[in-house]
Amino acid sequence: MDRDIGDIGDISAPARLAGTGEGISPQELALAARNHGMPLEALRYDLTPPGLHYVLVHYDIPYVADAGGRRLTVGGLVRRPLALDLDSLRSYEAVTLRVTMECAGNGRALLSPRPVSQPWLVEAVGTAEWTGVPLRVLLAEAGVGPDAVEAVFTGADHGVERGVEQDYRRSLPLSVATGDDPDVLVAYEMNGAPLPPQHGYPVRLVVPGWYGMAHVKWLRDITLTDTPFTGFQQSVAYRYRLTAEGPGEPVTRIAPRALMIPPGFPDFMSRARVVRPGRLGLEGRAWSGYAPVVRVEVSVDDGRKWHDAALDAPEDRPWAWQHWHTAWTAAPGSHVLVARATDAEGRTQPVEQPWNRGGFGNNLVQRIPVLCLPES
């Protein structure tokens, strides 16, 4: 850094768009090294192993030496404030939900112009079984005050963003926080084991169907308020904006998406795929935060023609991804494979980019260039 630092704003840049031809900056590279996506071959797992599940950490991963000594407080507009340690949370009847979680910025690096931030491609996703206590149970025990309208969640992670020093903090409408379709979880286990540090140990929030910014990690406080929360992560970040001015619309539920396991084998640097001629199985996963996925279509010619893939039923896990599969007879030459999902409410992935300044909710279809080798 070749200039003087006068105040905290000097080290925390405002949001901006990359210039024409501007590559990934050292700061974005550092973010990409700290945060990681799920390797697309891991779509083969019904449950993503914790080390392969995507990770986004806004600030530092808090170090917790003694989880037993940590308390989750529930206060604000409640009749009986609570202070719960991990043993107290485990004393409640446990609920386990299988939930697909996706970062709101997934696909951001594919946009043009590109918002400068964590440079996600399409891998910022994962599915896990989360075990914990329904939030509605804790709020019922605390006694929700008649004037409460929102629940505000505070994590233990602390940092600076766009010149604002802050704890990571988000809110949910009271109707969501106290609802049971689905339950919002105060979770302490991931895939049957204690939460890993990067996934919120010892306790985190899980909000099925919502993008990852709502799933507050390292949860330490829940406060009920009589006014909507206007903190940075709620009213400044995570808004759909076409211009820098104006409030924008809040980012909430996950838009439908289908991802394909890249077929064949990859080049080391480019990750371009190579296959041999003949009949190949194509498969992947599809999900939506609004409703079950009811259709997955596949194209092997970059979207000129489409055919339906076979789609597994959602069973009793409406907030988890669904497996799909089809077959393709590969012929020598270059091909572009595409998959798109449609949910029960009629939302379909676009084939042209849906753009906004934050790069949020970009569910543009995945395109996989494939080289099929000549007949041997």
Image (cartoon, rainbow, N blue to C red):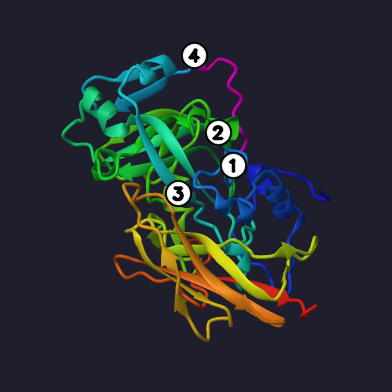
Q: Residues within 10 Å of mark 2 (few under 14, many from 20)?
A: many
Q: Amino acid at mark 3?
A: Thr
Q: Earlier in the sequence, mark 4 or mark 1?
A: 1
Q: Residue 119's spot in the image, x, y percent?
A: 64, 58
Q: Provide the residue designation for mark 1.
A: 57
**Residue at image point 77% right, 54% down:** 26
Inspect this view and state whether residue 334 appears.
yes
Q: Provide the residue designation for mark 2.
A: 157
Main SS of the magenta part reads loop
Q: Residue 177's spot in the image, x, y percent?
A: 29, 39
**Residue at image point 37% right, 16% down:** 88
Cα distance between the residues tagged 4 and 1:
23 Å
Q: Provide the residue designation for mark 3.
A: 100
Residue closest to the eye, 82 or 103: 103
Q: Provide the residue designation for mark 4.
A: 68
Q: Amino acid at mark 2?
A: Asp
Image quadrant in which you'd find residue 375: bottom right
Q: What is the secondary structure assignment of the residue under circle 2?
A: strand
Placement of 211 over or under 218, stated as above or below: below
Q: Earlier in the sequence, mark 3 or mark 2?
A: 3
- Give the magenta-colored segment's residue range: 59-67
Q: Earlier in the sequence, mark 4 or mark 2?
A: 4
Q: Earlier in the sequence, mark 4 or mark 3?
A: 4
Inspect this view and state whether residue 77 appears.
no
